[in-house]
Image: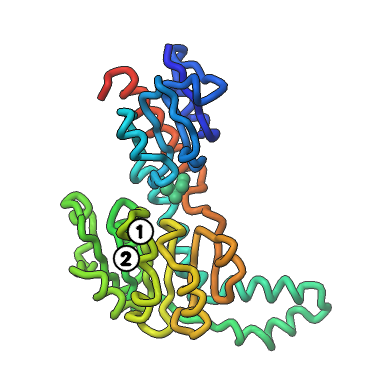
Amino acid sequence: MVNYKCLNPIAAVGVNLFTDDYKQVDSVEEAEAVLVRSASMHEMDLPADLKAIARAGAGVNNIPLDKCAEKGIVVFNTPGANANGVKELVMAGLMLASRNVVGGINWVQSIKDDPDVAKLVEKGKSQFAGREILGKKLGVIGLGAIGVLVANAANGLGMEVYGYDPYLSLEHAWNLSRDIKYVKTKEEIYHTCDYITVHVPLLPDTKEMINKDTMAMMKDGVVILNFARDLLVNDNDMEAALKRGKVKCYVTDFPNEKTAGMEGVIAIPHLGASTEESEDNCAVMAVKQLKQYMETGT
Ligand code: MLT
């Protein structure tokens, strides 16, 4: 019998893969295997019997990797399992930022009870005119599972796509459309692109990679999208860049106390992977990996 604990609910299609040999216990202290989505495990005491943690998602910054390594606890994540879900929301973010959709919706809400709403719309809609993404330059920083899908989708919509990844694997390079320009430095993207989207993990090297110095290299009126991790962006520097018009719009899937209320920010409540399909894929991959490890040690 394997005692496991799900720290967050996971999709039924994953839970159903557990056989009668697996028992969900009440607390982490009793568990040999843990399944987690976004709950932070940093403050938890890891029990002596814990052998494996499966994170149903890509980022592992909610797991104390150093402590796990010391104790010989194996950590799995589910790279790629929710990549399509995130890609689709990034593409929506590109459109939202380009077409003033959020401002337009809010304005319609504010006039919806006026008896002349249709007339007001005709008179006032020009304030929300946008621009098209066709032919614009998109820089994709990080060409892992999500970055590759975003690059290809944007390419399919007629954007001129620049991709940067210092660790681009052959497998991912092969999946990239031949029309994507692979550049050797992030700076080439900063200097060139109208839109920049980051798809890198949060690491000491990437923390606050979008800051006053990197934004100074960017074009005036650049649009920045962050569907990867909150701390990739220095919020104070972003606020200043938005105020100056250096950044036209910041689309983030990680609103916090600062960014949620900033002028020029489109803030989405971390919904990138919140689709039925992505949740099913992550749950299945996480449970399969956990079971395989508990049953075979590999
Ligand atoms: C991921 O890391 O997979 C996504 O940000 C979604 C999530 O945190 O579950």
The x and y percentages for residue 135 are: 34, 78
The dot on residue 253 is none
Residue at point 74% right, 84% down?
119
Who comes first in sequence, dot 2 or dot 1?
Answer: 2
Query: Residue flagged by tag 2: what amino acid is it?
Result: Val
Residue at point 20% right, 55% down?
167
User: Element type at marker 2?
Assistant: strand
Residue at point 16% right, 52% down?
170
Neighbour tally class for label 1: few under 14, some 14-19, many 20 plus, Cα within 10 Å: many
- Please give the count of numbered marks on the rendered protein: 2
Q: Are marks 2 and 1 in contact (CB under 8 Å)?
A: yes
The quadrant the N terminus occupies is top left
The x and y percentages for residue 249 are: 49, 75
| Residue labelled with disc 2 | 140
In the foreground, 208 or 15: 208
| Mark 2–mark 1 distance (CA, rounded to whole Å) | 7 Å
What is the residue that sits farthest to the left in this orientation? 170
In the foreground, 175 or 239: 239
Q: Is residue 293 left or right of residue 17?
A: left
Position of residue 125 relative to residue 33, above or below, is below
In the foreground, 201 or 86: 201
Residue at point 44% right, 29% down?
46
| Residue labelled with disc 1 | 199
- Residue 96 visible (yes or no): yes
Q: Is residue 157 left or right of residue 89?
A: left
Position of residue 43 relative to residue 227, above or below, is above
Residue 258's quadrant in the figure? bottom right
Query: Residue flagged by tag 1: what amino acid is it?
Result: His
The x and y percentages for residue 131 are: 47, 81
The x and y percentages for residue 79 are: 34, 44
Neighbour tally class for label 2: few under 14, some 14-19, many 20 plus, Cα within 10 Å: many
The quadrant the C terminus occupies is top left
